[in-house]
Image (cartoon, rainbow, N blue to C red):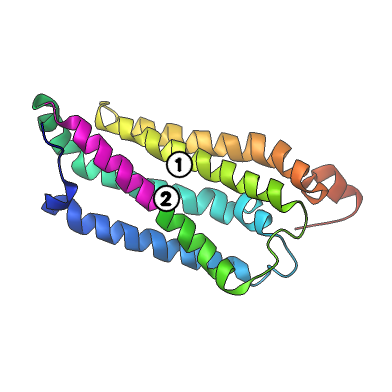
Amino acid sequence: MADIDLELLPQTKRFRRLSLALIFILSVAASIYTLHAIKERDIVYFFLYNNLLSLYLQTFILLIIFGQILKVRPIAVFLGIRQAETGLVKKLLQLILLDILVMTVGLALPYLLGVRHYFRWGSPALGSLLLFLHLLCFALCAFFMILSLRVSHPWLIFIIAIAVIMLYHYNLEQSTLLSKYSILFDPLYRATHYIYF
């Protein structure tokens, strides 16, 4: 069977363009919102410690991705009968990868155009690794949501993806990984030295 081309589906073509534009606009707006204090703070603070980007923006983008999947869900049943569902899954994976790339470019663009000191509080190598791990967790959760094509309660998949991101953000990233990057992220150190942010 030939792969299905999502470009030919009128129900997805316009929605895909709107969702990509919305992801880019939201990412750039959120990044610009954080730029005002970058001289005093670190890029890792804004992208990983700050809940605006780590939880709220990414949750909204996951909701957009989930909407893209739900938009093609009705035809997935018919494609499953024709054994062409693999082509649809491949196209959705490409679309989700494009969504993540657009989000990443939108978030990084204001920083790349104006700011030169990204990693002020710690090692650039470790900071880059932490940013990559956060993006990888987000990408895996986004790809995981493709399972909502097959299950009877797709919202459960969305809730699980959000829960995994929150568990990673609060239980691993904020409690352990960020303090390895900089002691300023250690709550005990901040409390001892009266550092508040």
Callout 1 crowding tier (Cα within 10 Å): few <14, some 14–19, many ≥20 = some
159 vs 42, left or right, is left
Identify the image quadrant of residue 70. Answer: top left
Identify the image quadrant of residue 156. Answer: top left
Question: Of helix, strand and loop, which one carries label 1?
Answer: helix
* Percent position of residue 116, x then y: 67, 69
How many badges with numbers are in the image?
A: 2
Mark carried by residue 100: 2
Residue type indicated by callout 1: Ala
Q: Residue furthest right?
A: 192
156 vs 38, left or right, is left
Q: At x 48% / y 56%, what residue is drawn?
A: 104
Question: Of helix, strand and loop, which one carries label 2?
Answer: helix
Which range is magenta?
A: 83-99
- The disc, 2 or 1, on the residue closer to the chain's N-terminal end is 2
175 vs 74, left or right, is right
Mark carried by residue 157: none
Q: At x 91% / y 48%, what residue is drawn?
A: 192
Asked whether the beta carbons under mark 2 and mark 1 sit within 8 Å of each other, the answer is yes
The residue labelled by disc 1 is 139
Residue type indicated by callout 2: Ile
